[in-house]
Image (cartoon, rainbow, N blue to C red):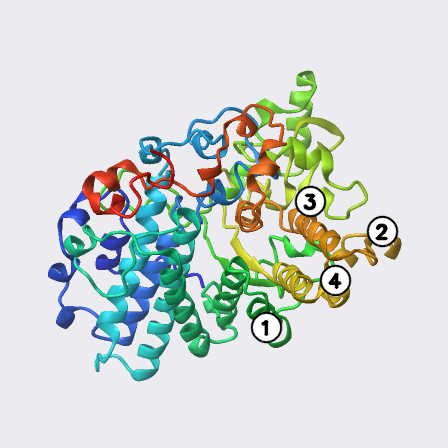
């Protein structure tokens, strides 16, 4: 869905970053129903404006959600001490640091942008419902997509903060500012209702020019993940099998094909957000001179190496640069996301996924750090630094197979679970002797799933979520060794959640009424 250039002014206001005026006005006083949502196109553009918020650096742009779902676990780490990711990944975060923003990435930015998605979604639903200026089919479609986006935002909010403000009406900002925290279980009940409603309406797939929009299967996978977090294994298995058996998605023959930048909408991808080159600054209309990621994707640059760090023999740096240039490539990224020491040392040497996840030698040059090539894009002509058009993968089918295997094992033991695990391992190894794990008991299979999700889904923003729901985050991190940080020393039991940022608490003291400790951070 290459729709990044299409925005209405009102939704630029809603998604604007750093726009204090937005915090002072009620959007319903800015845009009246009679002057907006007056056509099908208005309603559809409103949805596009809300999708745009997901591409901000604080969510799926750059490495926004990666900070929470991957950093501080056992897969990726920075190749140097980096101030803007260190508090989360090194478990030194507090309420005040949650407000510190670099390149629009902070706990506070993520909180605000997720709630902008909620606010927009509620507003759209309110303005589209029973609006006779919009055809019935479009009303139904737009409301379904809004409910999906609202569910997605609340799912992330509960994952990151647990109990949180929850509302599903088009409230004014003054009304929102005084909301206390709602129990996570109540929020997730509402999320599941939204997801089920969305699945009943959203299509199974879109035409090529609309790819990038969430289908019913994107809603289904979130629902399945919630059931698994709740340890409702039967519901999780049923929903996972619905995706496997009824969706148009299939596993690709090889792991490498999944990450082919020339085939970003391949059959294994359930949902990815599309980005485009050469579009910057559009999320900040209040500050036109300020250039942020816009719709060009920064994330590959975070995984791309930078030449000043490489190769291991610095005397060969010029030769490496020449070798890259001869291929039309460059090590011009930040190198900030590299394979963790623990991950690189433990990744099986005979696993065919290893070359996509561990690159410690390139073009014959030994490297200082092990990089993750599946997120690389070194091509200078099509993917310059901080200006990539690579999609951001959110969900894929291999994840669902592993979810089904886990649910089946928890319900009935490993006997019937291998049928979902084996297709993933078969493409990861050359021979049956290598991939076949038959003979495991239930606990052994459970531990195999811990590892298989680690290898298969490395740095795809699942790991900390998995470790937390398995109840093993603390144990895993305390046994880690990082290159520059000490997460093993700093982590505490309350680090399974983030603190609500200090500025939010100052603006709304009601956020502390149900939990004066702010998730254990005070």
Q: Picture coordinates of residue 366 (x, y %)?
A: 73, 27
Camera-side residue of 412 and 176:
412
- In the picture of the structure, the residue carrying the numbered disc 1 is 238
Mark carried by residue 147: none
Identify the residue at horizontal 75%, vertical 66% (top origin).
419
Q: Residues within 10 Å of mark 4 (few under 14, many from 20)?
A: many
> What residue would you read off at disc 3?
356
Q: Which residue is mark 2?
A: 434
Q: In the rendered image, which residue does mark 4 sit on?
A: 414
The x, y position of residue 329, in whole percent, is: 62, 37
Give the quarter of the image for residue 37.
bottom left
Number of the front mark, 2 or 1: 1
**Percent x, y of residue 11:** 26, 58
Q: Which is closer to the viewer, label 2 or label 3? A: 2
Could you tell which of marks 3 and 4 lies nearer the N-terminus?
A: 3
Residue 171 appears in the picture as rendered: yes
Q: Quadrant location of the C terminus? A: top left
Of callouts 2 and 4, the N-terminal one = 4
Give the vertical position of 387 relative to 230 (above or below): above
* Mark 1–mark 3 distance (CA, rounded to whole Å): 32 Å
Of helix, strand and loop, which one carries label 4?
Answer: helix
Q: Quadrant of residue 1?
A: bottom left
SS class, disc 1:
helix
**Mark 2 or mark 3, which has the lower sequence index?**
3
Task: Report, in whole angstroms, how far the alpha carbon at label 2 lies from the one at label 3.
Answer: 19 Å
User: Observer-nearest residue: 374 or 200?
Assistant: 200
Is residue 23 found left or right of 282 in the rendered image?
left
Q: Residue at x 49, y 43 (%)?
A: 66
């Amino acid at each position: 869905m290459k729709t990044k250039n299409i925005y209405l002014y009102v939704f630029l206001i809603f998604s604007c970053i750093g726009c204090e005026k937005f915090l002072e006005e009620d959007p319903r006083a800015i845009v009246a129903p009679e002057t907006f949502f007056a056509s099908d196109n208005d309603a559809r553009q409103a949805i596009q404006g809300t999708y745009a918020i997901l591409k901000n650096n604080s969510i799926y742009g750059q490495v926004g959600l990666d900070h929470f779902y991957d950093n501080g676990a056992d897969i990726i780490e920075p190749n140097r001490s980096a101030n803007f990711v260190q508090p989360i990944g090194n478990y030194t975060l507090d309420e005040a640091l949650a407000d510190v923003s670099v390149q629009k990435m902070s706990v506070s930015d993520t909180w605000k942008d997720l709630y902008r998605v909620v606010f927009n979604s509620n507003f759209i639903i309110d303005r589209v419902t029973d609006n006779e200026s919009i055809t019935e089919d479009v009303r139904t479609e737009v409301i379904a997509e809004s409910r999906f986006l609202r569910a997605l935002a609340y799912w992330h909010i509960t994952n990151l903060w647990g109990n949180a403000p929850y509302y599903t009406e088009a409230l004014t900002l003054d009304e929102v500012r005084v909301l206390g925290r709602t129990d996570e279980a109540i929020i997730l009940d509402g999320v599941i209702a939204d997801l089920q409603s969305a699945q009943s309406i959203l299509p199974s797939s879109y035409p090529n020019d609309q790819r990038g929009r969430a289908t019913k299967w994107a809603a289904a996978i979130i629902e399945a993940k919630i059931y698994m977090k709740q340890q409702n294994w039967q519901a999780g298995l049923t929903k996972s099998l619905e995706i496997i058996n009824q969706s148009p998605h299939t596993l690709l023959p090889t792991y490498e094909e999944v990450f082919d930048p020339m085939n970003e909408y391949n059959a294994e991808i359930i949902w990815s957000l599309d980005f485009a080159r050469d579009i910057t600054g559009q999320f900040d209309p209040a500050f036109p001179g300020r250039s942020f990621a816009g719709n060009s994707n920064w994330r590959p640059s975070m995984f791309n190496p930078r030449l000043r760090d490489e190769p291991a023999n610095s005397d060969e740096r010029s030769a490496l640069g020449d070798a890259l240039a001869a291929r039309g490539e460059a090590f011009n990224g930040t190198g900030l996301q590299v394979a963790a020491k623990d991950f690189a040392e433990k990744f099986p040497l005979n696993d065919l996924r290893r070359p996509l996840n561990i690159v410690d030698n390139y073009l014959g040059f030994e490297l200082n750090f092990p990089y993750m090539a599946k997120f690389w894009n070194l091509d200078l002509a099509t993917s310059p630094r901080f200006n990539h058009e690579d999609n951001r993968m959110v969900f894929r089918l291999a994840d669902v197979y592993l979810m089904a295997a886990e649910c089946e094992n928890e319900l009935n033991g490993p006997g019937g679970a291998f049928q979902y695990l084996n297709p993933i391992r078969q493409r990861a190894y050359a021979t049956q002797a290598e991939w076949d794990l038959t003979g495991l008991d239930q606990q052994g299979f459970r531990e195999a799933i811990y590892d298989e999700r680690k290898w298969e889904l490395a740095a795809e923003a699942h790991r900390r979520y998995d470790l937390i729901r398995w109840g093993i985050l603390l144990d895993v991190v305390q046994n880690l060794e990082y290159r520059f940080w000490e997460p093993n020393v700093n982590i505490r039991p309350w680090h399974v959640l983030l603190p609500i940022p200090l500025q939010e608490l100052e603006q709304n003291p009601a956020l502390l009424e149900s939990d004066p400790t702010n998730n254990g951070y005070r």
